[in-house]
Amino acid sequence: MKKKLSMLLAVGLLVSGITACGVKSEGSQANANEIKIGINYELSGGVASYGQSSVDGIMLAIDEINAAGGIDGKKLVPVKYDNKSEPAEAVILANKLISQDKVLAILGPATSGSFKSEVSVAEKKKVPVISGSATADDVTVDKTGKKDYAFRICYTDSFQGTAMANFASQNLSAKKAVIVKDSSSDYAKGLAENFIKTFKDAGGTIVGEEAYVAKDKDFNAILTKIKDLDFDVIYLPGYYEEAGLIIKQARALGIDKPILGADGFDSPDLTSLAGAGALSKVYFTNHYSSLDKDPTVIKFIDDFKKKYNKEPNAFHALGYDLAKFLADGIKRSKSLDSEALKEALASTTDFTGVTGSFSIDENHNPVKAIVIVGLENGVQATAVRSGK
Amino acid sequence: MKNIFKHSALQKFIMILITYAAIQGLISAGIIDDYLQATLATICINIVLAVSLNLITGFTGQFSLGHAGFMSIGAYVCAIITINNPTAVGFIMGIIAGAIAAALIGAVVGLPTLRLRGDYLAIATLGMAEIIKIVFLNLEITNGAAGLQGIPQFVNWTWMFVFTVATVLIITNFLKSSHGRACISIREDEIAAESMGINTTKYKVISFTLGAFFAGIAGGLYASFFFFLKPDLFGFLKSVDVLVIVVLGGLGSISGSIIAAVLLAVISMFLQSFSEVRMIIYALLLIILMLFRPQGLMGSKEISLSVFKKLGLKSKTRKEES
Amino acid sequence: MENFLQQVINGISLGSIYALIALGYTMVYGIIKLINFAHCDVYMLGAYIGYFCMTSLKLGFFPSMVIAMLVCTVIGVLIEKIAYKPLRNATRIAVLITAIGVSLFIEYGTMFFVKANVRAYPEMTGFLAKSFAVGGLKITAQQILIVISTIILMAMLQFIVKKTKVGKAMRAVSLDKDAAELMGINVNSTISFTFAIGSALAGAAGVLVGIYYNSIDPLMGVIPGLKAFVAAVFGGIGIIPGAMIGGYFIGTVEVFVSGYGNSLYKDAVVFAILILILIVKPAGLLGKNTKEKV
């Protein structure tokens, strides 16, 4: 039997190798009038909603660019794959995009974990990869040094967490805070750590730390526990899906202290989930506020509504900017290759997008101002700017 | 093991060598690029996982839904050791330590739970895997939800191949030993086996521990090849994925598990181009395959050499599973 | 004390949801020994059907719930006829894999049409928007609705199974399919009926969860499904009161671990208790240990 088995093993691996080669041949003939861009996003699996939203934003921008004649007459051609919200699949697809589809650059994935996995491939293959929402601090720089080919256009966790902690202790004069975080999300983990550090440095204390996991719907248990604590603010790093429900349930239990969050709050769904009445004394750090009437933002919201028939959220906006940012880099790039594109992206200064205007710093992070949006009855009532 | 130097063993050895050399050649020639290598790695990891789960579920008849838990132990232990000792020796130590840790947990969990039957055992093992996942999510050393990154990548095609072949050979040899036959007898009829004087608990635990050991190996390979770990990679759905491979290949068929692992990887590769609908097509294929081949592709048969001579199936005479 | 009672209320309302889903699992398992993974997705479909009834058709809560239950009944029966019936004589594990396939198909099929993002249920008005303060405790009308609906549905179910002819047929099929057939019971239609009831319950649970938490998404069934199944096993799978007890137990334990212990480990504690219970009582809390026949 062993013999048969090993035969089988042999043949199986061989067959897979050969079919794999067969697949390859259908690959890509580079067209002189096209620029191929890889899109490696979470279209199914646990965080599919973030991936799908980002891709919606990207496609809107690409359509706009192509409708306006492309970049120097060349059309952007997106090659879109679904990484099933799995970092290993993101690695496989990044390899596929680079070696078989021969893309110029890759956009995505949306989450830090998958993006970090992709960055290792990008470094090896020397192809720029850009994320619109990988916020973990060590995405572009880690212990081993700077990642030459990794870029992002979103805030880092430390920047957002610190900004909110300063706002809490200075503007809200908070001394005691409670943390409610999503223990299954790297985004929440990074924000919470940085918030706690800055808040403590400013003389505050953390009186309670509670956790939930993504897709939970019932938060009454932890909120009932928090209710009896003596605190000034709740810091709630996480996404609108759970944050909306937490705010609703907290207000229903009679917790009326300010609730602070991050750009994960920015979605029209936050209002519909929590109910406008519950959304008072809610503050979150964000890229832009609907209060400032920036024509870029207004045009984006109009175009987005026209195409998708719904209000955009932060992922849509970041996805849109991501594609525009890449297009801007390609335009300024001396030649159409990954090396020149990397240089062009790294030297971006004063790029104006929906999520604010920014320059890329030496660590490939955007330098952009942050807005702390305050909600009253579900409507943006205050916007405090804090620059960097 | 004693017939390893016999003629047929030699033939087999040559076959393995040719496969290895052929693919290695294609890699060196650049025909198999990094993308295909990553796919090959997935296939190898899935073969190790499926064959080890088949030992537990297919051959010993114990329904386990916790394979991802054992895999995660192997992956994290291997990753932590290689991060602290980024040498080839460190990697070997890591993967072995990971497998042993997984086997230990397997034995500890197996001893009390393996007296449960059928679906109750499945739920107990599922619960165990969830607990392991939550512990990894909250430990400092695993970096929680943010995940472990920067794991040195040692595993290449050669390592993958060596570990996969070793796993398959060790498990098939085990199954041919008296211990293995004892395990199969438990699947066929536990009471009859017990009355024949077989210590069923002991053999169930042995099979479970051995399965966990190789799941740990698969985890180590995964950690080293994909260099990033996150607790939610090893959730319930991962266990289900492995189970799907085992059942699709045929419970109690090692060759079936191998074919199914390759087949699913190839299907998944073709589906990559259908980004939005890939999971829908995958689900449909799963249903259709099961409706038409409920016993799996191979049933409990093994593929034999004569296949290549006669191009027909010559089955081993083993009782079909009822 | 006040805090404790509030947590009890939280536990009971969460437990009701698990119990409601667990009922469907337990019935199907009782009759064909299948872990129907697609059950939690029927629950999700119920929530979406209710959502579209309320938003697009502007129907009220009760008509929406009835429509959701009816449509889910049809879907449940269709799933059984198309995917499970041809496998009646296959191994149980093969049917299990088919169930997983059906589950993935429904999840991603739904996601294809409605996208992955969450949707908020329309805000309730009238009685369903009220909340009551008893002493220092807060109880919402929706919590009351959920608990009462669960108890009514479970009582109806118990009545159907114990007192009606169909129920008798269900019990007969669950005991011995072949013997039941010989006694003139139509096994196929009995199984279909079981799926119909189970799916109707899932549909109801979907709408109730929709209005209670007002958030639905295509993967909303996965985690409650898993926990509800654990609840069913905990109580003794195949036993209707067992599912109920299991549901309330899991809900309460979860709430108390979060409320008085460490919320990081709430699910781990639930599973640890489950494993302990199974080791002590291998057939669940209410299950009978069947002696093996030689």
Image: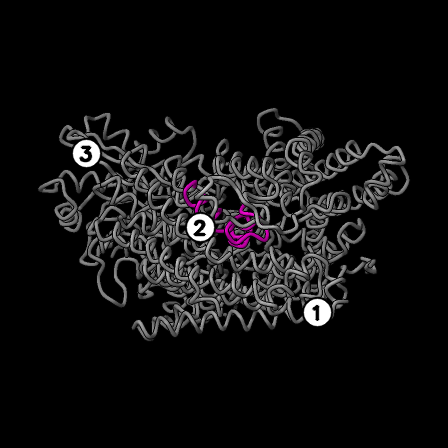
- Left or right? Give the position of A38 relative to C143: left
- Of circles 1 and 3, the one toward us is 1
- Left or right? Give the position of A59 relative to A376: left
Quadrant of image for the N terminus of chain C: bottom right
- Left or right? Give the position of B311 relative to A170: right
Q: Secondary structure at mark 2?
A: helix
- Of circles 3 and 2, the one toward us is 2
Write down the residue under mark 1.
B198
Write down the residue under mark 2.
A8
Residues at discs 3 and 2 in contact (Cβ within 8 Å) = no
Residues at discs 1 and 3 in contact (Cβ within 8 Å) = no
Write down the residue under mark 3.
A30
Using the image, name the chain to which the residue with label 2 belongs.
Answer: A
What stretch of residues is rendered in magenta? B238-267
Q: Magenta stretch: residue B195 in it?
A: no
Inspect the image, locate mark 2, and give the three-letter code of the amino acid beneath it. Leu
Task: Say few, some or many: other residues with alpha carbon within 10 Å of mark 3 (under 14 / 14 to 19 / 20 or more).
Answer: few
Inspect the image, locate mark 3, and give the three-letter code of the amino acid beneath it. Ala
**Residue drawn at (73%, 39%), measured in percent from left and top?**
C198
Secondary structure mainly formed by the magenta segment: helix
- Left or right? Give the position of A381 relative to B101: left
Upstream in sequence: badge 3 or badge 2: 2
Using the image, name the chain to which the residue with label 1 belongs.
Answer: B
Find residue A227 and name its label. none
Mark 2 to mark 1 CA distance (whole Å): 32 Å
**Residue drawn at (26%, 29%), measured in percent from left and top?**
A64
